[in-house]
Amino acid sequence: MDVTPLLYNEFPLFLKCYFPYKVQKISLNAGFTCPNRDGTKGYGGCTYCNNQTFNPDYCRTEKSITRQLEEGKVFFSHKYSEMKYLAYFQAYTNTYGELEALKRRYEEALSVADVVGLVVGTRPDCMPDSLLSYLEELNKTTFLLVEYGIESTDDATLQRINRGHTYQDAIDAVERTAARGILTGGHVILGLPGDSHEKLVAQAGILSRLPLTTLKMHQLQLIRGTRMAYEYEQHPEDFHLFGVEEYVDLIVDYVEHLRPGLVLERFVSQSPKELLIVPGWGLKNYEFNHLVQKRMRQLGAYQGRKYEI
């Protein structure tokens, strides 16, 4: 029997290790803010950020977590009759609040029928030990993945995008979380001002040293109403926005330099057309994945081929 070699560790296969049925993430907006929005660390948020880009219609702060989940289930249930769900606390910083209030939100989500786990998106500088201790206990009874917005391993880049934390903060948060036995994910944006192909490929090796289970990446997108969109308008020469073919080449090189065991959740993101300025590729995630896989087969490439311990 012919067995197609695994080009990279795909997220659906990772989930199959935990669930014998199909699972789908449902995005939630639980009404959080961020420390670089409310004045704790700064104002205005990250220069690229407009949270409308990843909030589906069912995902609105005026709706309770339960209602958001129930409407999300209706949205996805036509795909598979036996579908189960992960509550994905996605918008803004979902560990930024008083501990008891956070616990209420997480536990409300887990009380909804057919919700079988949590994915909690947050910042590296917003994970106190008290919350980690609670999550460590929660992790014993349900699926839990904590996903940190790392965005870049370069402090100058982090400062330029008004991120409000350093890469050392990311190292500390990831190591502390993984040490508790909690699945730990990272998120990066490829193509931020100052990035180059060589710098990003080096980033793959740097991230591979972290005890991450999963990694999400996507191309820089310029979104209406953001400070970065204004900066692009004033100084377009400061930006290098990838074409599809160039980005495919970058991803293949990036993946070859990643630790072989790292689970790769996605390579691209597609913001709503009404908010997106550039780049407008018009490709769905699976279509882009097919382009990457085709290129990898042409080159004999696979995840970790150029990884150096």
Image (tube, rainbow, N blue to C red):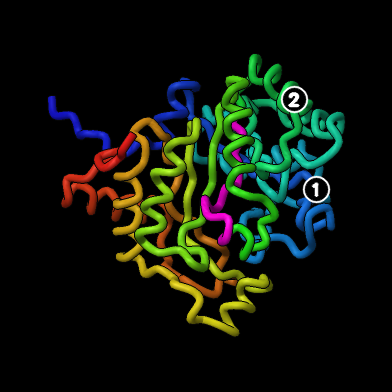
Q: Which of marks 2 and 1 is in front?
A: 1
Against 1, residue 290 (above or below) is below
Q: Residue furthest top?
A: 140
Residue 262 falls left or right of residue 29: left
Would residue 150 be counted in the magenta stretch? yes
Q: In which quarter of the image is the N terminus?
A: top left
Q: Where is residue 2 in the image (x, y as percent from the top left)?
A: 13, 29
Q: Name the residue under label 2.
A: 111
Query: How crowded is the residue under tag 1: few (<14 C-alpha within 10 Å), some, or many (20+)?
Result: some
Residue 252 falls left or right of residue 117: left
Q: Residue shown at 78%/30% (left/top)?
A: 108
Q: Residues at badges 2 and 1 in contact (C-beta under 8 Å)? A: no
Against 252, residue 48 (above or below) is below
Q: Where is residue 220 in the image (x, y as percent from the top left)?
A: 50, 63
The amino acid type of the residue labelled 1 equals Gly
Q: Nearer the viewer, residue 143 or 192?
A: 192
Q: Where is residue 294 in the image (x, y as percent from the top left)?
A: 23, 51
Task: Determine the CA span between mark 2 and mark 1.
Answer: 19 Å
Q: Mark 1 points at which residue?
A: 31
